[in-house]
Amino acid sequence: MSTYGTTRHHHPPVAPNFSNKDRVTDYHTTLFRRLIWDGTVPLEIRVDPKELPANSDRGLECYFLQAPRVTYMPLLMPEIRRFFMDLVFDETATKDLKDEEWWFETAEGRLVKWHWPIGLIYDNHIISTSLKPSSSRAASAATPLRLTLHLASPPSDKLLLSPSAEACKQAFMGQLKEADFIRWGNTKRMTGLRQQDQDGMWEGIKEHNFDDYWRVASKVTPTTTPSHTGPPPSSTSMHTSPPSADPGGPSERDGAYNVRSVPVRIYLPDGPVIQELVPPVLADGTPHTLSSYLTANLPLLFPPQPPAPPPSRTNPNPRPPSVSHLAYALIQGIITPHESEMAWLGACLAGADGWVNVCIGLHNT
Amino acid sequence: MAHVDEVTPERFVPSWVLQTTFESTEEALKALQVYKKKDAEKVIVRFKAVGNAPIMKDNFFKITASNRFQAVIQFLRKQLGYKATEPLHTYINLAFSPAPDDLVSNLFKSFATDNHLIVNYSTTAAWG
């Protein structure tokens, strides 16, 4: 059975700043969570030239920032607002501006949602761009996501939420609870947290503080501790026994391979979003991989791999015929190997809201 | 040396790096059109009042699965005669508030009980 090497070797936790009395997170899990947390994307923000107030300093009309993938647009607003108010807009003009009416769209005219993580907005931009001929998207991956800031008349019916940090926090908590429900069939882990801890997770996002966020998040995120080296071997039918019957103790009960389902969503270029129940282990006892997940949900883009032809005298070691690869899967900006196991992705590559976002881009000539 | 050509590049280069052809791009775009097609199917949504929220006489409704959850909220407000400014909180399975842009079809696939998507509504925050 092919396994994802990084999850199987048990190392003592060596990350010095990370400790948790209840649960010890292994080195590789912490490493991947840290890499995801530290991921940033470049943004270029420009006020719609038609809306630029009189006497603005046009020499400074553009603001560049490197935003954490796990943060949200409402949390970046104070910084963006300060730049434009202090340096670009004329003092008399700023009196009439109400920043609760500000909103963003991409240079291509797609609305920027207040309640989507920045990393998801960025990856959705990348996959939408993948539909265009390569000549018109030269080096698009290396350039910032260009956003237009509008100063009035937000299309509230399409943005759906108010731009306040409080509305964003509520949406974030809703996503965490939905992910909890997907994993365990109830939200006991989330509702069992003290209010102070729930707020602490959001503060961790706001301050971009890994330790503050994970101190609490590790109580609700499945572990990858390989106490029985991950999934059961395919020769037995251990997957049919209820998780509670496993003699592995608490860490086993919270293990990534014991969840009912992994919180995953597929984003196709310019929509729609596909959400299905994704068991960590398939009926035959093998781990559900990104490959089997994509083939099950998008067979036209990820056709099943046909088996190798029987060996013959001229070809004693036949290899399976190659299938055409029309598309790729982007998770947290990474083109993800298809043998990655869904359970591992759920424990290590999920966003701060608990969800694994799989963005599908097209290979292009 | 004679065996060198048996080692094909595919062995070393990840498959996604391989060149795609014009035909395969066309095929991929066609596939996306198929997945983009809206589901005309309808699913049953069952509204349940929580706390002091007014109870609905008929609480079973068929709603097009390709709608966003926002459409469910708006429908519910209309049924209850609630204005957009009056507070109304909605939950799935007494557990969480979905995002307004979640598709009804996705929520149904993940959370339906006995072929119904149960939507709880409350005038105060309950499981927010």
Image (tube, rainbow, N blue to C red):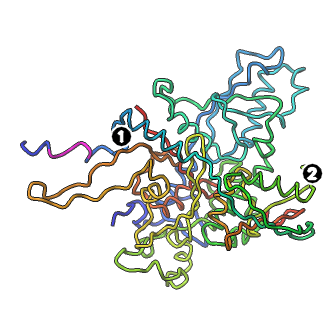
Identify which residue, A324 or B31, lies in the foreground: B31
Please tell me the numbered disc located at residue B57: none
The part of the chain drawn in magenta is: B6-10
Pointer 2 indicates a residue of which chain?
B
Q: Which residue is mark 1?
A: B17
The reply to whether residue B84 is visible in this rendering is yes
The amino acid sitting under disc 1 is Val
Q: Position of residue A336 (x, y in %)?
A: 44, 49
Q: Choose the circle earlier in sequence order: 2 or 1.
A: 1
Q: Is residue A109 left or right of residue A296?
A: right
Q: Residue at x 75, y 41 (%)?
A: A158
Compared to residue A245, the image places residue A288 above or below, namely above
The reply to whether residue A189 is visible in this rendering is no
Quick check: is A229 in the magenta stretch?
Answer: no
Please tell me the numbered disc located at residue B83: 2
Most extreme residue toward the left is B2
